[in-house]
Image (cartoon, helix red, strand yellow):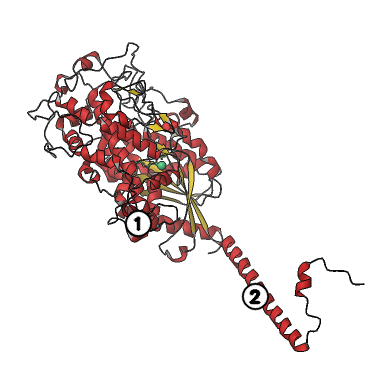
Amino acid sequence: MPVPSEDPLDEVLKPPPDETPEQRELRLEREAEAKRVSLAIDANIKAERQALRKKRIVRLLLLGQSESGKSTTLRQFQRLYTPTAFREERILWRAVIQLNIVRSIRIILDALSGPMPNSPYSSPRARNRSLSRGRAPPLPSNYSPPFPPQSHAPDNMDQMDYPRRNGHGHDMNFSYVNHPLYPPRQPQRHQIPPTHHYNDPDLDDDLDDSDTDFAVGNNSYPSSPPNFNGSPRSHPSGSSTTTLAQSPLEALKARLLPLRHIEALLIAKLVPPNEEEATHLAGPSHYQNGQPSPTDSQFSHHTLHHNGRPYRHQRSQSYRNQEIFVRPGPGWKGGLARARVNFPDYSDASSQSSSNGQRPMSAGNTGLESPDEPQEVLHSCKRDMIQLWNDEAVRDVLRRRKIRLEDASGFFLDDLERVTALRYMPTDDDVLKARLKTVGVSEYKFEMEISAGRESGTEWRIVDVGGSRSQRPTWAPFFDDVDAIIFLAPISGFDQVLAEDRTVNRLEDSVLLWKDVCSSKILANVDLVLFLNKCDILEKKLNSGIKLAKYVRSYGDRPNDLDSVSKYLRGKFSAIHREYSPNPRKFYAFCTSVTDTVTTAGIIASVRDMVIRQHLKQSKLL
Ligand SMILES: Nc1nc2c(ncn2[C@@H]2O[C@H](COP(=O)(O)OP(=O)(O)OP(=O)(O)O)[C@@H](O)[C@H]2O)c(=O)[nH]1
Ligand SMILES: [Mg+2]
């Protein structure tokens, strides 16, 4: 007796009992065809899998100290090789640029205001002689000046066995004893705001000089009330040589108060709710205990609530170390994308459609426009900001306080007219100039949209890391499987100190970091590309008379020009590479200004070719 089939399909598919020979033949033919199609599909899938396995993946790691230009270099790669995505995202950078502007203005106002409570830079005379001739801010009773930078290196640098003690021939000889970067301990009166810590022995550090009084010009600056919602004011703009008269400075500051609110608003946009640390603001003097004071009542409806909690403006915190950061990746951009404002006539066709299908349609088309409040406020404050930035006396105070905003990251004050326009759309250059600190490590994947010959089909993975000292321990896990490293050393920082440790010279930190990277055993077979970056700023500094030899004693009396300085530094970095690399390997060095699109495009093309060549060689495909 036949055993019944357990597969119900067998019953259905079995040939009919009365099948004729012709029918049988037809049926077998159909079955054979179906089998052939099925096998072809299987073979296709297998081939695709194999191709995927064989697909070239090139991994590039961007290393360097904070503000060295890593994220900017990544943006250059994106601009060159995924231009559509780069263009689409330009509008998202507007909030970052707005924040950069607001913070620059705030740095100026803080510098003009003299000491904030608990702020260390003041002498009694300086306080009595308020720059604005207004009321001097009171000193808190527990005030005591901080210690100045140490005259010796911090412990972690000692462990790195830096040349200061070993005197290797190739090492740079930084001045330490009584060096301008490491002055003897003495009360420090002026604290330099974040992102541009300088140490220039040639500059007059003494604000007590009688000539530091705020210049009193004939300019009658209108002391109108804060014009937050109103139309742009009518007082003259662009008067580059005027000076702010006595009390008008106070009026000007009052009119710029809305920028405080805009700062908080932008932070809420940019920083995810769980990154509260990055949202702490220096305390505007008009806030107390996190609540607006009565004088803020006109802005009270703008008191921000972030994640259900009001922002607590911390009155006593200094402004430094509070750079806004985002963790890399699409998160912050996603948030901004939801709030973005589109200008139909600016956006090209590609930006109207969403690459991932999640972006809102152009708000301008749907009538669902989100109010563009930060831009409106910036626009209404434009004249005051221009007035402030172009004022001679203000520049003088900044110079005396060694604040060189024009060399600092995220500087847009020379472009205020353009970037505060209501329908402002960031250009490529603006996106490259914008500053947003990276915290964490992230890998960006992209295939080159632009056909790059034999590189087509190569997947690039570029790893961007946060460069500040606290971030560096997170780098190591990303050292595996790396084809090349682009190391950025911002050589313009020879007269600056680290934001996170003001006892450490930036150039020296770069040299130490470079030595560590060169001597790393895990990276022994990874090719190194060195970008001696920020050469544009370096050139400006050297031309303005700042001498490298004052900070790097070993430079001696060589010429103080870009060519000689960059050659010298390149030689030093190259010597460290030769001496400390565990194995011989390829090394390429470029003098770069990665914000410059033209020169950087050429350099990136060379790096791309070199990395691909090495990659193929190592995969034994050449
Ligand atoms: N003028 C000039 N500015 C530069 C150059 N390279 C970078 N910048 C600017 O310097 C700032 C810092 O650059 P980033 O790319 O954010 O620095 P980073 O290395 O990613 O810094 P972290 O994220 O803190 O590690 C940005 O505002 C850039 O626009 C350069 O060669 N010249
Ligand atoms: Mg970065």
Q: Residue furthest left?
A: 218
* Left or right: residue 12 compared with residue 287: right
Residue 174 in picture, x, y percent from top left: 36, 31
The answer to which of 111 and 233 lies nearer the viewer is 233
Placement of 425 over or under 474, stated as above or below: below
Q: Identify residue for label 2.
A: 37
Numbered disc 1: secondary structure: helix
Query: Which badge, 1 or 2, is on the more N-terminal residue?
Result: 2
Mark 2 close to ligand 2, CB under 8 Å: no
Q: Residue furthest right?
A: 1
Q: Tell which tag, 1 or 2, sits nearer the viewer.
A: 2
**What is the three-letter code of the residue carrying label 2?**
Val
Q: Residue at x 20, y 37 (%)?
A: 230
Q: Do callouts 1 and 2 mark residues in contact (Cβ within 8 Å)?
A: no
Numbered disc 2: secondary structure: helix
Residue 53 in picture, x, y percent from top left: 59, 60
Q: Residue at x 48, y 42 (%)?
A: 441
**What is the three-letter code of the residue carrying label 1?**
Gly
Q: Identify residue for label 1.
A: 602
Determine crowd level at label 2: few under 14, some 14-19, many 20+ residues with C-alpha closer than 10 A: few
Q: Marks 1 and 2, Cα distance to the nearest angstrom?
A: 49 Å
Residue 83 in picture, x, y percent from top left: 37, 57
* Left or right: residue 487 compared with residue 294: right
Placement of 184 over or under 409, stated as above or below: above
